[in-house]
Image (cartoon, helix red, strand yellow):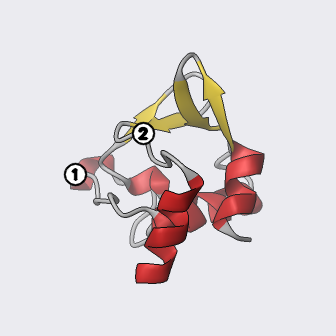
Amino acid sequence: MEAREVLSKYVKETGGAKCFLGDDSSREDMRAAVVLATACPLYKDDNEEEIYLEGVLTCYNCRYRRWTRPGFSCFKNFPVILSTIDNSLQAK
């Protein structure tokens, strides 16, 4: 799964914020959160007591993740634009 595919399938604008609408009980949805976190230039591990999945680079473990009614959003408003993801992936 690629970052562009994840964006089109899982990230929706809701109430002026971009929300990840995946389900944490779905393997595919969890993988999508890993893809986004890997592409994110702003990712930072959350505090230890807020870690959702031990030892996994995923948006669920990011310090900037904020839980919302439909899923979660990024406090840093990532992804701002698709080119942000493209540039981030090329740098890694």
Coordinates of residue 76 in the picture (x, y in percent): 35, 41
In the image, taking residue 47 as reference, residue 37 lies left or right, namely: right
Q: Residues within 10 Å of mark 1 (few under 14, many from 20)?
A: few
Relative height, residue 83 to residue 77 (above, below): below
Q: Earlier in the sequence, mark 2 or mark 1?
A: 1
**Numbered disc 2: secondary structure:** loop
Relative height, residue 80 to residue 42 (above, below): above
Please report the residue visible at 50 percent of the width from the left and 49 percent of the height from the top. 79
17, 22: nearer the viewer: 17
Coordinates of residue 62 in the picture (x, y in percent): 36, 53
Quarter of the view holding residue 20: top right
Coordinates of residue 11 in the picture (x, y in percent): 65, 42
Label 1 near label 2: C-beta < 8 Å? no
Please report the residue visible at 47 percent of the width from the left and 70 percent of the height from the top. 87
Res. 92 in view: no
Q: Amino acid at mark 1?
A: Asn
Q: Amino acid at mark 2?
A: Asn
Location of the N terminus (image quadrant): bottom right
Where residue 47 is drawn, which disc sits there? 1
Location of the C terminus (image quadrant): bottom left
Please report the residue visible at 39 percent of the width from the left and 72 percent of the height from the top. 55
Where residue 77 is drawn, which disc sits there? 2
Measure the C-alpha gap from mark 2 to mark 1. 19 Å
Please report the residue visible at 47 percent of the width from the left and 54 percent of the height from the top. 59
Res. 49 in view: yes
**Numbered disc 1: secondary structure:** loop
Number of the front mark, 2 or 1: 2
